[in-house]
Image (tube, rainbow, N blue to C red):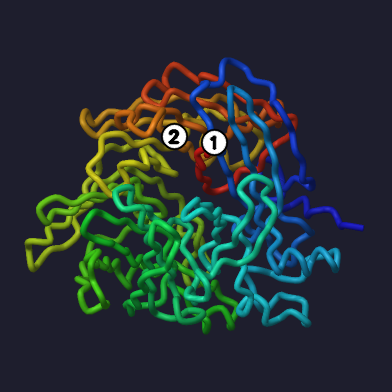
Amino acid sequence: MAEPMPSDSTFLNFPWAPIQMECEASDLMIEGEMPADLSGTLYRVGPNQRWRPRGDYHLFAGDGMVHAFHISGGRVDYINRWVRTAKFNMEDVEGRALINALNPFDCDPDYSDFPLTDKEGLANTAAVWHGGRMLIMEEGHQPYEIDPITLDSIGSWTYRGKLHTAMTAHPKVDPATGEMVFFAYMATGPFSEDVMVHKVSADGLLTQSIHIPTPYSAMVHDFVITENYIVVPIFPITGSLDRAMTGGPPFAWEPDKGVHVAVLPRNAETAEDIRWLKMETCFVFHFMNAFDRDGLISIDAVQFPQVPLFPTPDGEPTGSTKSKLCRWTIDMNNPEAEVISAPLDGFELEFPQVDPRYAGQDYRHGWYTTTDGNVKSDMEVNENLYNTIGHWDHNTNTTVQYSCGNGMVSEALFVPRSEDAAEGEGYLLAVVTDFDTRLSGMWVFDALDIAAGPLAKAHLSHRVPPGFHGTWRPAG
């Protein structure tokens, strides 16, 4: 019999609390009118802890669950499944948690080496549809393949044995060529001081891997590509095995180590072609987009003055910090170039998105989530609950926002109305959890008129726990 979850853990209580079920729901109730030309599947990936965890629980350590909304002909069907990784399957047999994913020293003795040898990880962070495969990622391990319709687990995908590292949760697909670029930090082993950049052809073949030594061991969550460059920032979220073995945090904020930005030409053969640039101390979880023109690289970043969610080396919190949208500028024509960051606006935001047909290219429209500060609940973290969707226009440097009310909104994904539609012409899809009803639904907006409110809401009779990222797979 499964033990109840601890009642004193923030991430095991509403709204993050896991749902202990897998289910399917056909023909969801639609409020409004689902666009007839919207056809495909919205996937959401997040942690959904199966068993009472070992030790303290953090959201990053939850078992991965995928939620899919299949949309066609104005109808929406829903399905959710845990990802059957090796960890999930072993614990399912035992009926209890065996692995502490964030603390290898707090595992069942028979599985004490599992976190360092398992290639499947947790599969709880993001998804990508590329080369005819639906891959679920959790940046510390290799991607995990699932069936895109049934969500049945298939297994780790290693690109036919050629991938020997993990895969970032934020691979980038070049819309002009179909090539996917991704990276892995700590590429040659736990807490190693390096990154590996990989390239995969449009038909899913791994074509190149470039090993890049880094100034220190660091957690690297996101990066950008442009037509001519790959840019990988190394922020001072340092990894230390010695620190972990003496009871300290495995990853910690050490701003004195500085920020180091690697600029690698897209056609580079080795790491010798990299230019390492410095910039002001800051931190970025997610980038909106990037592009280059005549040797000038522009990168739009959700920038924090210091990292949230991670401690200092002595285990103390770094303190409250707010993000803002900033543009980084790199002049590759200047031999003495540094990364120059300037704010585009002062509002708080996260989970930025663009029209994927303009990824890595000059663009106008971006979308994000933020808060209006009006969520009503008895939780102490209300200021961190994003309940608002925003649209940023780079041509006018203005933003429009729509509040989803007393609830929590997921990252909002853009879907073009058609392949030849103008930039931004399409739909914005997000999962919203209502704090009053404690139920979730998928909301669909006109991406260029979000202030008008949702065109349609597909209602569920249960809650989707807040996750991290998702993807869209068009029909056909």
Tell which tag, 1 or 2, sits nearer the viewer: 1
The residue nearer to you, when weighing 271 against 420, is 420
Which residue bears the numbered disc 1?
40
Q: In this view, does 407 lie above or below 188?
A: above
| Residue ranking furthest to the left | 334
Picture quadrant where residue 108 is located: bottom right
Marking on residue 415: 2
Q: From the viewer's perspective, is 412 left or right of 199?
A: right
Query: Residue at left 35%, top 78%?
Result: 211
Query: Residue at left 55%, top 24%?
Result: 405
Q: From the viewer's perspective, is 441 left or right of 210?
A: right
Query: Residue at left 33%, top 31%?
Result: 420
Q: Give the SS element for disc 2.
A: strand
The x and y percentages for residue 319 are 46, 55
Report the amino acid beneath label 1. Gly
Could you tell which of marks 1 and 2 lies nearer the N-terminus? 1
The residue nearer to you, when weighing 404 against 457, is 457
Tell me, yes or no, whether the two marked residues, 1 and 2, touch with CB atoms within 8 Å.
Answer: yes
Query: Residue at left 73%, top 64%?
Result: 88
Q: Is residue 113 above or below residue 2?
A: below
Marking on residue 426: none
Q: Give the SS element for disc 1.
A: strand
